[in-house]
Image (cartoon, rainbow, N blue to C red):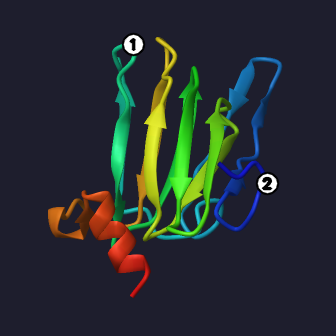
Amino acid sequence: MSSKQSDLVQWIEIPKLGDDRGSLVALEGNKIVPFDIERVYYIFGTKPGVARGFHAHKALKQVAICITGKCKMLLDNGIEKAEVWLDSPAKGILINHLVWHEMHEFSTDCVLLVLASEHYDESDYIREYSDFITRVNT
Protein backbone atom coordinates (compact mmCIF):
# COMPACT_ATOMS: atom_id res chain seq x y z
CA MET A 1 0.00 0.00 0.00
CA SER A 2 1.32 3.41 -0.83
CA SER A 3 1.34 5.78 2.10
CA LYS A 4 2.20 8.85 0.02
CA GLN A 5 -0.61 11.14 -1.03
CA SER A 6 -0.64 11.19 -4.84
CA ASP A 7 -3.19 12.16 -7.46
CA LEU A 8 -5.01 8.97 -6.46
CA VAL A 9 -5.97 10.58 -3.15
CA GLN A 10 -7.75 13.89 -3.80
CA TRP A 11 -9.24 15.46 -0.68
CA ILE A 12 -12.13 17.90 -0.92
CA GLU A 13 -11.96 20.47 1.88
CA ILE A 14 -15.49 21.46 2.88
CA PRO A 15 -15.75 24.89 4.49
CA LYS A 16 -17.52 24.83 7.85
CA LEU A 17 -19.97 27.63 8.39
CA GLY A 18 -21.76 28.44 11.60
CA ASP A 19 -21.45 30.20 14.87
CA ASP A 20 -21.75 29.43 18.59
CA ARG A 21 -24.98 27.50 17.85
CA GLY A 22 -23.12 24.90 15.81
CA SER A 23 -21.65 24.13 12.39
CA LEU A 24 -23.15 23.90 8.93
CA VAL A 25 -21.70 22.75 5.63
CA ALA A 26 -23.08 23.47 2.17
CA LEU A 27 -22.23 21.11 -0.69
CA GLU A 28 -22.63 22.80 -4.05
CA GLY A 29 -22.09 21.08 -7.38
CA ASN A 30 -19.32 22.53 -9.56
CA LYS A 31 -18.13 24.59 -6.62
CA ILE A 32 -17.19 22.50 -3.58
CA VAL A 33 -18.01 19.26 -5.41
CA PRO A 34 -16.18 19.22 -8.78
CA PHE A 35 -19.16 18.01 -10.84
CA ASP A 36 -22.95 18.32 -11.14
CA ILE A 37 -24.56 16.26 -8.38
CA GLU A 38 -27.08 13.84 -9.92
CA ARG A 39 -27.46 11.35 -7.07
CA VAL A 40 -27.03 11.37 -3.30
CA TYR A 41 -26.99 8.29 -1.08
CA TYR A 42 -25.63 7.28 2.28
CA ILE A 43 -24.47 4.09 3.95
CA PHE A 44 -25.22 3.49 7.62
CA GLY A 45 -25.82 0.66 10.07
CA THR A 46 -22.97 -1.37 8.62
CA LYS A 47 -22.44 -4.50 10.69
CA PRO A 48 -19.04 -5.02 12.39
CA GLY A 49 -16.53 -6.71 10.11
CA VAL A 50 -18.52 -5.97 6.92
CA ALA A 51 -16.75 -4.27 4.02
CA ARG A 52 -18.48 -2.45 1.17
CA GLY A 53 -17.67 -1.24 -2.32
CA PHE A 54 -15.45 -3.65 -4.24
CA HIS A 55 -16.06 -2.04 -7.60
CA ALA A 56 -15.06 0.76 -9.96
CA HIS A 57 -17.07 2.88 -12.38
CA LYS A 58 -16.49 3.41 -16.07
CA ALA A 59 -17.63 7.05 -16.04
CA LEU A 60 -19.15 7.96 -12.64
CA LYS A 61 -17.30 10.26 -10.26
CA GLN A 62 -18.12 10.46 -6.55
CA VAL A 63 -17.27 12.40 -3.42
CA ALA A 64 -17.49 10.41 -0.18
CA ILE A 65 -17.88 12.20 3.17
CA CYS A 66 -18.11 10.52 6.54
CA ILE A 67 -20.65 12.79 8.21
CA THR A 68 -20.40 10.89 11.48
CA GLY A 69 -18.09 8.14 12.68
CA LYS A 70 -15.32 6.83 10.46
CA CYS A 71 -14.31 4.20 7.93
CA LYS A 72 -11.20 3.26 6.00
CA MET A 73 -11.23 3.73 2.22
CA LEU A 74 -8.99 1.77 -0.13
CA LEU A 75 -8.42 3.41 -3.52
CA ASP A 76 -6.72 1.62 -6.42
CA ASN A 77 -6.12 2.98 -9.93
CA GLY A 78 -4.50 -0.21 -11.22
CA ILE A 79 -0.99 1.18 -10.70
CA GLU A 80 -0.97 2.26 -7.08
CA LYS A 81 -3.11 1.75 -4.00
CA ALA A 82 -3.75 4.04 -1.05
CA GLU A 83 -5.67 3.66 2.19
CA VAL A 84 -7.11 6.67 3.98
CA TRP A 85 -9.45 7.24 6.90
CA LEU A 86 -12.66 9.16 6.30
CA ASP A 87 -13.38 10.64 9.70
CA SER A 88 -14.48 14.26 9.29
CA PRO A 89 -17.73 15.86 8.10
CA ALA A 90 -15.61 18.74 6.76
CA LYS A 91 -13.43 16.64 4.45
CA GLY A 92 -14.42 14.40 1.57
CA ILE A 93 -12.53 12.29 -0.90
CA LEU A 94 -12.93 12.42 -4.66
CA ILE A 95 -13.32 8.99 -6.25
CA ASN A 96 -12.68 9.41 -9.95
CA HIS A 97 -13.91 7.04 -12.64
CA LEU A 98 -11.79 3.92 -13.12
CA VAL A 99 -10.74 3.86 -9.46
CA TRP A 100 -11.44 0.62 -7.61
CA HIS A 101 -12.70 1.42 -4.14
CA GLU A 102 -13.47 -0.48 -0.99
CA MET A 103 -14.67 0.67 2.43
CA HIS A 104 -13.57 -1.18 5.57
CA GLU A 105 -13.57 -0.85 9.36
CA PHE A 106 -16.80 1.10 9.71
CA SER A 107 -17.37 2.49 13.20
CA THR A 108 -20.77 1.57 14.63
CA ASP A 109 -21.94 5.19 14.26
CA CYS A 110 -20.61 5.67 10.71
CA VAL A 111 -22.79 7.47 8.19
CA LEU A 112 -21.01 7.68 4.84
CA LEU A 113 -22.56 10.24 2.47
CA VAL A 114 -21.82 9.85 -1.24
CA LEU A 115 -22.44 12.46 -3.94
CA ALA A 116 -22.44 11.04 -7.47
CA SER A 117 -22.06 12.65 -10.89
CA GLU A 118 -24.64 10.39 -12.55
CA HIS A 119 -27.86 8.56 -11.80
CA TYR A 120 -27.57 4.86 -10.93
CA ASP A 121 -26.66 2.78 -13.98
CA GLU A 122 -25.66 -0.85 -13.43
CA SER A 123 -23.85 -0.94 -16.79
CA ASP A 124 -21.36 1.66 -15.46
CA TYR A 125 -20.10 -0.73 -12.74
CA ILE A 126 -16.99 -2.87 -13.00
CA ARG A 127 -17.54 -5.51 -10.31
CA GLU A 128 -14.71 -7.96 -11.01
CA TYR A 129 -11.22 -6.83 -10.06
CA SER A 130 -9.66 -8.75 -12.95
CA ASP A 131 -11.97 -6.92 -15.40
CA PHE A 132 -10.96 -3.61 -13.81
CA ILE A 133 -7.23 -4.37 -14.21
CA THR A 134 -7.77 -5.39 -17.84
CA ARG A 135 -9.70 -2.18 -18.56
CA VAL A 136 -7.18 0.21 -16.99
CA ASN A 137 -4.27 -1.49 -18.74
CA THR A 138 -5.70 -1.31 -22.27
The answer to whether 113 appears left or right of 16 in the picture is left
Percent position (x, y) of residue 24?
A: 67, 33
The answer to whether 55 appears left or right of 24 in the picture is left
The answer to whether 89 appears left or right of 77 in the picture is right
Marks 1 and 2, how far apart at CA: 28 Å
Amino acid carrying mark 1 in the image: Pro
Percent position (x, y) of residue 111?
A: 46, 26
Residue where numbered disc 1 is placed: 48
Percent position (x, y) of residue 29?
A: 53, 64
Percent position (x, y) of residue 89?
A: 64, 33
Amino acid carrying mark 2 in the image: Lys
**Residue drawn at point x = 35 percent, y = 23 percent:** 50
> As rendered, which of 21 and 48 lies closer to the eye?
48
**Residue drawn at point x = 24 percent, y = 69 percent:** 124
Q: Quadrant of residue 55?
A: bottom left
Q: Secondary structure at mark 2?
A: loop
Mark 1 vs 2: CB contact within 8 A:
no
Give the label on residue 4, or none: 2
Q: Which sits earlier in the primary sequence, circle 1 or circle 2?
A: 2
Residue 118 seen from this side: no
Residue that lies at the very extreme toward the bottom in this rendered image: 138
Residue that lies at the very extreme toward the left in this rendered image: 122
**Residue drawn at point x = 39 percent, y = 17 percent:** 49
Q: Secondary structure at mark 1?
A: loop
